[in-house]
Image (tube, coloured by chain):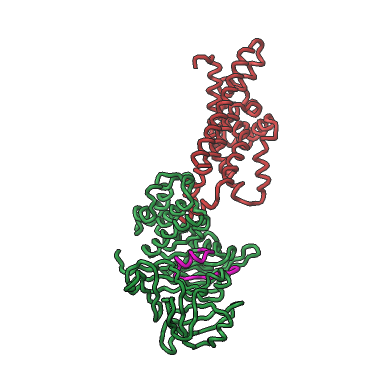
Chain colours: A red, B green
Amino acid sequence: MIWLSPDESEALRLSLSVAIRSVAISVPAALGVAWILTRRRFLGHTLLDAMVHLPLVLPPVAVGYVLLLLFGARGPIGGWLKSVFGIQLIFTRNGAALATAVMSFPLMVRAIRISLESIDRGLEDAARTLGAGAVDRFATITLPLMLPGLLAGAITAFSAALGEFGAVITFVSNIPGETRTLPLALYSALQEPGAEHAAARLAVLSVTLGLAGLLVSEWFARRVRRMLGR
Amino acid sequence: MLTVSSTKQCGTFQLDVSFDAPTPGVVALFGPSGCGKTTTVNILAGLMRPDRGRVTLDDTVFYDTDLRVDVPAEKRRIGYVFQDARLFPHLNVAGNLRFAERRAARSGRIGFDQVVGMLELQPLMTRRVHQLSGGEKQRVAIGRALLTQPRLLLLDEPLASLDRDRREEVLPYLETLRDRLAIPMVYVSHRFDEVLRLATHIVLMQSGSVAAQGGIGTISLDRRLRAMIDPDAVGAVVDGTVVGRESSGGLLRVRIGSGELQVNAASPPGTTLRVQLLARDIIVATQKPEFLSVRNQLKGIVTAIEDDGASDLISIDVGSGREGGGGGPSILARITKAATRELALAPAKPVWALVKSVALRGVTSAGSPHE
């Protein structure tokens, strides 16, 4: 990246790395939650639905704070992870990935739910009569048919992860080379007198990345629609 | 033998069906829309669970409440052709066929190439599902169901979503299936003409239960069928045997009971032709008529006279030709009440039935087996 400064390219690399990890965490989880919310009726359905959507309406700082309470060194989950697996999330890029995953989770669940609901259940019945068991049906019929929604959701979540600020800075702080992603670098530049030029460059970079993500997502969705003849 | 007896409560709709059908053969579930035909087929396939009941095919029990047997749909090996085809949109035609083939029993006797050949799917193989016409979709769906090596094939109104021409395009394939593969089939339809061409056994369904069942000849005479079809479509359906060709004309001589009909068709001797003798096309005479242009005359005995509104329906046994005979094929004639009175028609009276026209309803079995 010859036209980026070392700091800028480090922030960019870190952002991409955090976003990839974030999507990797949230895809399987969102798939499971979306499946339960679409296909199962149970007590607490509405509560689970509300919990999933909570990050959309909470201030990101509040989400970061809750994560800090749960996953901090003395938090119930954080303490357990540390003592059993030696994993520390606060002040690390994995922690940043967790924070962005939680923030983009509602987007992902929504996208997957919509594509799950649009699948004709009759096709799954047809697969049953052709000898396909439950796992087989999910892998060969349901998953491929919801793939467009799943991937569109993943790309949107990825783009959102690149831009997450509040939850990240609250949970894992702003450590250069570890948790200082693009938005955090941009924020730091704005705090520094005389760094307006650097801030502008980072802003342009963020805009370019976000735009690219949305365009790829749209292009992909269109391509898949054409493939399925819709 | 396919045996079904099941009850199921769906909302306010109560299904209570029970029938036995000989196998192999084509059982038609016939009845008006919303009478429980599709529910019955779904119970057969295992896609719906009855509240109580039993579903067996020959020695295999698929479902039995008392024995606590419920074979899951994916293990029943029952092929299902849905009204809306339900092809997988993310696979092409070959992919849809292979999906079934890969999951089928290895010892299958229906080959991939045989199915492709029989249904003429070769030109469609690389097409995507949305590039197929309605008729083509159904052909692929039929092929896909066959490749599961089914013990039983369910066809739920496979032609209902097609227009007349497309129906005519798919029907011959279904006849081929019936004649070349000894797979028992259950064919759901609310169109009597389709049933006539395909079925060997009919189950008449009405508001969730079985009104009548039996062979096509018997059911074609049944009063309960008449309530479901157009009055002009009422008439006996008889399977006759081709005995030869008439000397002067080009007409086929087809044996019906003890008589013969001349039919404009081309089939080798020995072939079984299914003909429909519409009740409105039959003239009844009490003496052997002479000096008439009507060539098709069957001798018979009146077995019943039924009031059918403005006219009477006369059942005539044309099977024996002998006095006191019976058990042969019967035909129906619709005549005015005045005619019934003037001819003094009554059960056991010998009559001649003049057939004005014979509607050919397909070939039900070939004469000389060449396969």
Decide which of A91, B237 is in the foreground and name it. B237
Residue extending furthest bottom? Answer: B323
- The stretch in magenta equals B188-208
Residue beneath the point at 61% across and 36% down: A107
Is B125 drawn above or below residue B334 in the view shown?
A: above
Residue beneath the point at 40% across and 64% down: B178
Residue B190 shown in magenta: yes
Q: Image check: B34 left or right of B146? A: right
Residue extending furthest front? Answer: B291
Residue B159 percent coordinates (x, y): 49, 58
Decide which of A226, B104 is in the foreground and name it. A226
Decide which of A227, A187 is in the foreground and name it. A227
Q: Image check: B246 left or right of A87? A: left
Residue B114 percent coordinates (x, y): 34, 55
Residue A160 visible to an observer of this rendering: yes
Residue beneath the point at 63% across and 12% down: A195
